[in-house]
Amino acid sequence: MGLARPRRSVDGGPRPPSHEPSGGVLVSVLGVICCEVLELEFAYLLASDRELARITVLEDGRSERLLSSLGAQGLPGVERISTLGEFVPHGHGQPEALVRVLELGLHIWPQKLRTALVQAAEEMAPRVDALVLGYGLCGNALEAPSTLLSHLGVPVFLPMNEDHPVDDCIGLLIGGRERYYAEQCKVAGTFFVTPGWAYHWRRLLDQEMGGVSLEMARRMFQHYARTLLISNPVMSDQEMQESIQEFVDTFGFRIEACQGTISILQTTWQEARDSLHPH
């Protein structure tokens, strides 16, 4: 695949040449497709990459909070488009990012997630030089990514834990499968909460439980004992606890916290960025 670290990318077929606008200046475009539950983490990555000349976001209800986070950081060069067809590389000879946020909760229906992700990737691939996917295995929806995405024609990067994709957003932000499993062994009835889960928990529970009664929901959670907050730089522990307090009070869980990480995401991002300028 011609990548610096090919084991962390999915073989998307031959890489197309970089885009060349009418001015004749080659540009490199990094595409991003992420779940809404990781919106703040990707806003953090985008804001931290000072070499990006421009960030273009497909604006819809799902990208609202990512755009708000980018705006709060005062980033110049953030543009909004209503369709991917509006995107035109800027042609300044510097890398840029094209971002699309997908609906949260798709992991509940693996086939629906698989279909939505492949469709989004197919629509974005002709416009970018590499793709970063903000997803893990997600209930085995992406258990064979090299087969699922092999036709795209661009390298595709997924967050990896050693030699395999991370299990899901929890595994991604807690630091990998080993630590994920260790926390489950400590307390079998653990409800893991990331910043995205803390903010969106009402919507996620409504989707997962299909509008069941509160009494039925309590029965479903009767074997859980704690809520484990997985903190990282995008949201303070206090804000996470305030966001999840109603959930904890409703189901009677105790709250504990552990230090999370975005290092896996940062590694994935850097490897994708490096692929735009192979040595």
Image: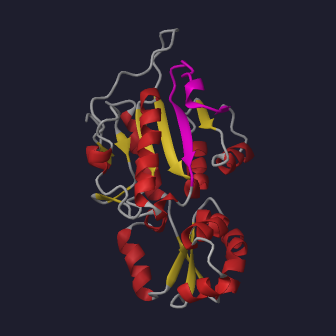
Q: State the quadrant of the N terminus.
A: top left
Front residue (pair 80, 237): 80
Expressed as whole percent of the image width and height from the top left, the position of residue 69 reads 69, 49
* Rendered image quadrant of residue 132: top left
Q: Is residue 161 magenta?
A: no
* Rendered image quadrant of residue 269: top left
Q: Residue at x 57, y 43 (%)?
A: 46
Magenta-highlighted residues = 78-103
Front residue (pair 237, 88): 88
Q: Is residue 79 magenta?
A: yes
Colour option used: secondary structure
Q: Relative to residue 210, is residue 234 depicted above or below?
A: above
Q: Residue at x 59, y 52 (%)?
A: 39
Q: Residue at x 68, y 44 (%)?
A: 67
Q: On the rendered structure, is 148 left or right of 246?
A: left
Expressed as whole percent of the image width and height from the top left, the position of residue 275 reads 36, 35
> Is residue 216 in sight in this rendering?
yes
> Is residue 221 in sight in this rendering?
no
Q: Residue at x 68, y 51 (%)?
A: 65
Q: On the rendered structure, is 277 left or right of 89?
A: left
Q: State the quadrant of the C terminus.
A: top left
Report the label total: 0
* Rendered image quadrant of residue 104: bottom right
Expressed as whole percent of the image width and height from the top left, the position of residue 32 reads 50, 41
Q: Relative to residue 188, is residue 234 depicted above or below?
A: above
Expressed as whole percent of the image width and height from the top left, the position of residue 40 reads 61, 54
Which residue is situated farthest in the top direction here?
23
